[in-house]
């Protein structure tokens, strides 16, 4: 019988090496998967891990995908470290995109560059508004934030579908459910000519630095983490649990909304039903693979964007289904969970205890022992 036994002390090396081991196992499973699908495993790995970085343009596309993943994951890290389980960052991403798109639609030929910060601020406020609903339900109604945040994802998606198919529908769009293309002045400034890399990349890196300072160099960040690790100790120290919930969810919502604004006013350039790209869910994996640390999440966001681009290339060049991206994401998450379990626990083989057969003579001796013992004591 196998039994998990808590290790007396965690290995510092494997605590940080676990994501690398999980990635190696994911690659091995991927090789077997390519072989089972009748594809060349070497070519499959090349599509996933070499094609996205083989040229400056490919690296630019990699950064475009990694930017929203990193920004959303940074906000989720605050939630998870505070023991607040925001699973609905996808909905906050969509609301941020809707709010930013609404501001972008107000622009015309004479609009100035001030529209860019207005779009970003609208996205932040939209994401915060959607996260505030979750925070209010948790604070006032004691509702589970996992369920409420997840259900609000579908509400946000349906709201987007209604807007692009109704009030905001482009009358010149040949009846497609989409808004008109935003004016050029609303497009996020790009860093390089001939590339789609925008100011979202430096914004994401600055956000990672700000999060590091907040978590590890401020009293408020310390209070958030203490509340997540030891709620009783946080209450004893005078830290407010209600405030921690609001800070965590509003920060996460603001980050997701900012990512939505950068996406809709950047690579997409309009509101369409395809704005929900699953970034909010993939960012959960990014956060945990990056160990909820800003530096680790930078690298895990790049890795996850490789899976996105690799899945698209595998579809077009190898004839594989697009769902292969989700398969690799799921494999990485489950292998990471398995590795983390073995870091914290060790497997022991516990032998089953078998009853010892008792003979008739032994039973008689045991039955007589209580009567004999007092007599020996008196003697």
Image (cartoon, rainbow, N blue to C red):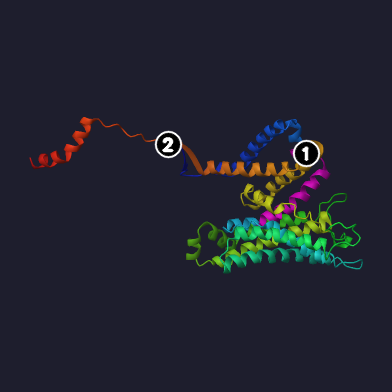
User: Dot 1 lies on which element?
Assistant: helix
User: Looking at the image, is 47 positioned above or below residue 248?
Assistant: above
For this rendering, which residue is in front, 359 or 247?
A: 359
Residue 354 falls in which quadrant of the image? top left
Q: Earlier in the sequence, mark 2 or mark 1?
A: 1
* Residue 199 in sight in this render: no
Would residue 358 appear left or right of 69 to someone viewing this image? left
Residue 310 in the image: above or below residue 258: above
Say if mark 2 contacts mark 1, CB within 8 Å: no
Identify which residue is drawn at 11% across, 39% down.
Answer: 376
Mark 2–mark 1 Cα distance, whole angstroms, equals 46 Å
Q: Is residue 202 magenta?
A: no
The residue pinned by badge 1 equals 314
Q: Residue 375's x, y, as percent?
A: 10, 40
Residue matched to label 2: 350
Identify the residue shown where x is 83% and y is 51%: 196
* Location of residue 199 by image quarter: bottom right
Image x and y of residue 264, in percent: 80, 58
Residue closest to the eye, 353 or 86? 353
203 to the left or right of 88: right
Q: Secondary structure at mark 2?
A: loop
**Magenta segment includes 65:** yes
Q: Identify which residue is drawn at 29% across, 31% down.
A: 357
Q: Which residues are magenta?
A: 47-75
Magenta part mainly helix, strand or loop? helix
Query: Crowding at label 2, few (<14), some or many (≥20) Cα neighbours within 10 Å?
Result: few
């Amino acid at each position: 019988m196998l039994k998990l036994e808590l290790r007396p002390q965690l290995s510092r090396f494997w605590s940080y090496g676990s994501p690398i081991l999980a990635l190696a196992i994911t690659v091995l499973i991927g090789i077997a998967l390519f072989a089972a699908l009748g594809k060349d495993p070497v070519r499959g790995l090349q599509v996933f891990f070499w094609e996205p970085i083989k040229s400056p343009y490919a690296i630019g596309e990699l950064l475009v995908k990694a930017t929203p993943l990193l920004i959303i994951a940074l906000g989720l890290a605050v939630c998870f470290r505070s023991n607040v389980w925001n699973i609905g960052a996808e909905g906050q991403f969509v609301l941020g995109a809707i709010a930013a798109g609404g501001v972008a639609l107000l622009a015309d030929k004479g609009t100035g560059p001030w529209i860019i910060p207005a779009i970003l601020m609208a996205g932040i406020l939209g994401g915060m508004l959607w996260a505030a609903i979750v925070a209010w339900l948790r604070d006032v109604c004691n509702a589970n934030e996992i369920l409420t945040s997840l259900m609000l994802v579908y509400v946000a998606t349906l709201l987007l579908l209604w807007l692009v198919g109704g009030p905001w529908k482009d009358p010149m769009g040949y009846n497609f459910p989409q808004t008109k293309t935003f004016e050029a002045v609303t497009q996020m400034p790009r860093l390089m000519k001939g590339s789609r890399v925008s100011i979202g990349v430096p914004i994401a890196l600055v956000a990672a630095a700000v999060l590091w300072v907040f978590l590890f160099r401020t009293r408020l960040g310390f209070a958030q983490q203490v509340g997540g690790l030891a709620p009783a100790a946080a209450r004893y120290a005078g830290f407010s649990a209600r405030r921690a919930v609001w800070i965590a969810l509003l920060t996460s919502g603001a980050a997701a909304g900012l990512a939505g604004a950068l996406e809709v006013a950047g690579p997409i350039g309009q509101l369409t039903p395809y704005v929900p790209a699953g970034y909010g869910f993939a960012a959960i994996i990014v956060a945990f693979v990056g160990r909820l640390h800003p530096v680790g999440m930078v690298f895990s966001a790049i890795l996850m964007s490789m899976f996105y681009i690799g899945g698209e290339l595998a579809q077009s060049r190898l004839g594989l289904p697009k769902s292969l991206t989700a398969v690799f994401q799921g494999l990485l998450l489950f292998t990471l969970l398995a590795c983390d379990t073995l870091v914290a626990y060790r497997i022991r083989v516990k032998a089953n205890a078998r009853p010892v057969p008792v003979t008739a003579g032994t039973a008689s001796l045991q039955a007589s022992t209580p009567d004999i013992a007092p007599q020996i004591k008196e003697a």
